[in-house]
Image (spheres, coloured by chain):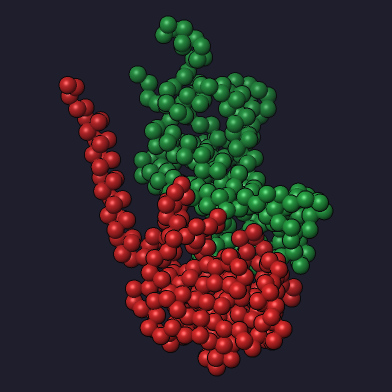
Chain colours: A green, B red
């Protein structure tokens, strides 16, 4: 009996993250529609010059968009769901991060292996992707160096930053921990960064799903759901069972 | 009968402990004012976590105050419904007949004119108005802390919320006692060294700077102290996020 491709902790926290991330993304975009203008610094409103504007209609008639109509207001439920999903994401992330530190998942599976901690090693693996060479046998049970570095960046840089910039939008959080919003350069800067960080996560999400599609979508989904290792093509494995 | 498996035993044990734990948390939460009025429904757990976290960790925190140089040159008033006939009549008379009623669970219900409020200690704060839509501005707000008015009215210890009403129909909101007594919660009558303009809530606006702009209701005429609150709104009751 093979050991599972992903531990139960990784599988559960992975899917909780997917669900909360999608909810945060959809509700976040709904909230943006009520003011699709972005600013830099502490303050910003329709009487001030924006850093940039997203060319979409707004759900508020006070925002000059150039469109002759106003979108329906979805902010009530969107905001409720945004912050509830944020709790799921933060608590899931905490459980994952603490457990990964304690059980060695971080050191064993995520930190690039000794001898791989160089730009050259990353480039070498990138070339393998670009030349569409099949991954070696060592990658059936382990992440390659590009995966490791990407996952580390997403889990320990992008997600913490998107959470911090989100917290810096909360008036009560800013009252108790003014350091965060002040060191980011103001609340509107935090809002703009929150928006950019979201897109960085969306880029990761798209590439991540594309890579899974290329490497065998259902086998990977099964690996992340039931934990079953699928070292052979799923159809062959099923024939053997039959 | 099937023997009880170890897994079933552990699962049901955990479930029972979870239910007991939730019940205990609910009791403690209610006693210490950590449960918001919109704690039920799909979004209840998230709201309860947010509200409880703030009341446990940041009860006395002060909203950020800014230097005078950061006061927005172009604040945004946001739009409100057209003024009611009652408002227009009071406005025509220079708001001399504007009255604020304090009632409900108070020892001394009272009715105050703007002159009465101006004779109370005047404070100012340079704080940011943060709208749930995303925009913001910084202004100086001049008025009298609500806590002083509440002291004079003698809010009874069993009061847990304040509900406050605008002169505009169907416009009211509520805060808990912690925010009611917070030193930055102001009955505001002035803005940036002048009278509070009507667009920004003049003649009387309740400023709650630790929460989003929608809690700072404009044109306040009545504040009532209550011990329980049924909240029905599309937006989260606690807007400190």
Above or below B202: residue B13: above
Above or below A82: residue B140: below
**A36 lies left or right of A146:** right
Nearer to us in this view, A4 or B14: B14
Please tell me in which quadrant of the rendered image residue A117 appears: top right
Residue under the point 42% across and 43% down: A96
Q: Is residue A121 visible?
A: no
Nearer to us in this view, A37 or B83: B83
Q: Residue B154: x, y in percent?
A: 39, 84
The C terminus of chain A lies in quadrant: top left
Nearer to us in this view, B11 or A99: B11
Nearer to us in this view, A212 or A12: A12
Specify the farthest residue to the bottom: B119
Q: Residue B60: x, y in percent?
A: 43, 74
Please tell me in which quadrant of the rendered image residue B191 appears: bottom right
The N terminus of chain A lies in quadrant: top left
Q: Is residue A68 visible?
A: yes
Residue under the point 55% across and 55% down: B234
Above or below A229: residue A15: below
Residue under the point 45% across and 28% down: A225
Q: How many marks?
A: 0
Q: Residue B186: x, y in percent?
A: 54, 80
Q: Residue A67: x, y in percent?
A: 81, 51
Residue under the point 74% across and 51% down: A70
């Amino acid at each position: 009996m093979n050991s599972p491709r992903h531990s139960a902790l990784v599988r559960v926290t992975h899917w909780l993250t997917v669900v909360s991330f999608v909810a945060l993304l959809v509700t976040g975009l709904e909230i943006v529609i009520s003011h699709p203008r972005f600013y830099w610094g502490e303050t910003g409103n329709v009487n001030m010059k924006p850093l940039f504007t997203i060319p979409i209609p707004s759900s508020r008639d006070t925002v000059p968009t150039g469109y002759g109509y106003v979108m329906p207001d979805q902010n009530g439920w969107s905001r409720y769901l945004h912050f509830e999903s944020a709790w799921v994401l933060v608590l899931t992330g905490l459980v994952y991060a603490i457990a990964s530190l304690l059980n060695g998942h971080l050191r064993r599976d995520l930190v690039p292996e000794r001898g791989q901690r160089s730009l050259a090693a990353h480039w070498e693996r990138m070339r393998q992707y670009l030349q569409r060479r099949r991954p070696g046998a060592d990658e059936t049970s382990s992440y390659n160096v590009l995966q490791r570095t990407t996952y580390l960046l997403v889990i320990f840089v992008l997600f913490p930053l998107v959470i911090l910039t989100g917290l810096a939008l909360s008036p009560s959080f800013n009252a108790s921990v003014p350091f965060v919003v002040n060191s980011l350069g103001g609340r509107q800067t935090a809002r703009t960064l929150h928006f950019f960080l979201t897109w960085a996560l969306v880029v990761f999400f798209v590439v991540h799903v594309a890579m899974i599609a290329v490497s065998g979508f259902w086998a990977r989904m099964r690996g992340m759901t039931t934990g079953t290792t699928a070292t052979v093509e799923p159809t062959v494995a099923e024939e053997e069972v039959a | 009968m099937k023997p009880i498996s170890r897994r079933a035993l552990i699962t049901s044990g955990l479930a029972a402990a979870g239910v007991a734990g939730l019940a205990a948390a609910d009791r403690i939460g209610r006693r210490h004012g950590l449960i918001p009025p919109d704690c039920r429904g799909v979004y209840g757990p998230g709201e309860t976590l947010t509200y409880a976290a703030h009341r446990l960790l940041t009860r006395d925190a002060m909203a950020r105050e800014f230097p005078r140089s950061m006061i927005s040159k172009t604040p945004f008033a946001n739009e409100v419904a057209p003024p009611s006939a009652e408002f227009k009549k009071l406005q025509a008379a220079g708001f001399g007949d504007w009255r604020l009623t304090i009632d409900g669970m108070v020892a001394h219900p009272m009715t105050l004119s703007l002159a009465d409020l101006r004779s109370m200690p005047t404070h100012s704060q340079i704080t940011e108005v943060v709208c749930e839509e995303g925009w913001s501005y910084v202004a100086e707000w001049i008025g009298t802390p609500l806590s002083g008015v509440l002291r004079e009215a003698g809010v009874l210890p069993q009061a847990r919320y304040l509900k406050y009403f605008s002169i505009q129909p169907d416009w009211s909101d509520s805060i808990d006692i912690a925010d009611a007594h917070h030193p930055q919660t102001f009955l505001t009558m002035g803005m940036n060294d002048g009278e509070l303009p009507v667009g920004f809530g003049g003649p009387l606006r309740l400023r709650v700077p630790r929460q989003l702009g929608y809690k700072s209701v404009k044109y306040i005429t009545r504040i009532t102290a209550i011990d329980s609150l049924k909240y029905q709104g599309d937006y989260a009751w606690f807007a400190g996020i």
